[in-house]
Structure formats: C-alpha cells, structure tokens
Image (tube, rainbow, N blue to C red):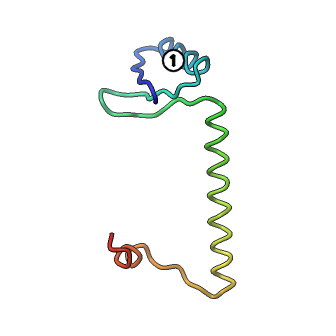
Amino acid sequence: MSQSITAKSGSDLLDAVERMASTGQRLAVRRGRQVMGGIVSAEDLRWLEEMDRQDIAAAKAAEERAARRGEKPIPWSKAKKMLRL
C-alpha cells in the first residue's frame, strides 16, 4: 500500500524520501487528486529495472525467433480483432 504526499517545498519532499527510505513504503506524489509520480526504495527501483531488462531481453528473443522462422508480426489492430478486444 502506498501513501500519498503533497510536497509544498523541497524540505517536504526530502522528509517524504527519508520516511520512505526508513519504512520501505512507496509514496505517490500527487497534484490535487492526480498522481504525478512515485517514490520507491532503492531495492524496488533495482527490481523494476531488472524487470525492464528481462522484458526487453524476452522481446528481442521473440523477435529473433520469429525472424528465424520467417514469421511476420501481427499488427496490433488485427490482434485486437482476433482477440475480440
């Protein structure tokens, strides 16, 4: 569960970052009711970056497999129709 912060000054933001670092909780940065961004722990950031790396590697491997097989990608518009989305 994330907490929300509304920082009115740099010191408010620094306090929020320090609170996040000590508790490990994720913080949502809001402007009014709209979430503008988030603050996560270094551990969560490393995890997110690793997930991105794995996603990119999997996508490249899938593209290479398809190319070796002579397969062409299905356009998203056609895939949506096939999946009835």
Instruction: Name the kind of residue labelled 1 in the image.
Output: Ala
Determine crowd level at label 1: few under 14, some 14-19, many 20+ residues with C-alpha closer than 10 A. many
Residue at x 48%, y 79% (from the top left corner)? 74
Disc 1 is placed on an element classified as helix
- Residue 80: image quadrant is bottom left
Seen at 53% across and 29% down, the residue is: 39
- Vertical arrangement, residue 15 with respect to residue 32, above or below: above
Number of marks in picture = 1
* Image-based side of 8 in relation to 21, left or right: left
The vertical placement of 7 against 55, above or below, is: above
Picture coordinates of residue 60 (x, y %)? 66, 67
Q: Is residue 76 left or right of residue 47?
A: left
Q: Position of residue 68 (x, y in %)?
A: 69, 84
Q: Is residue 32 left or right of residue 53?
A: left
Q: Which residue is mark 1?
A: 16
**Vertical side of 2 occupied by 8: above or below:** above
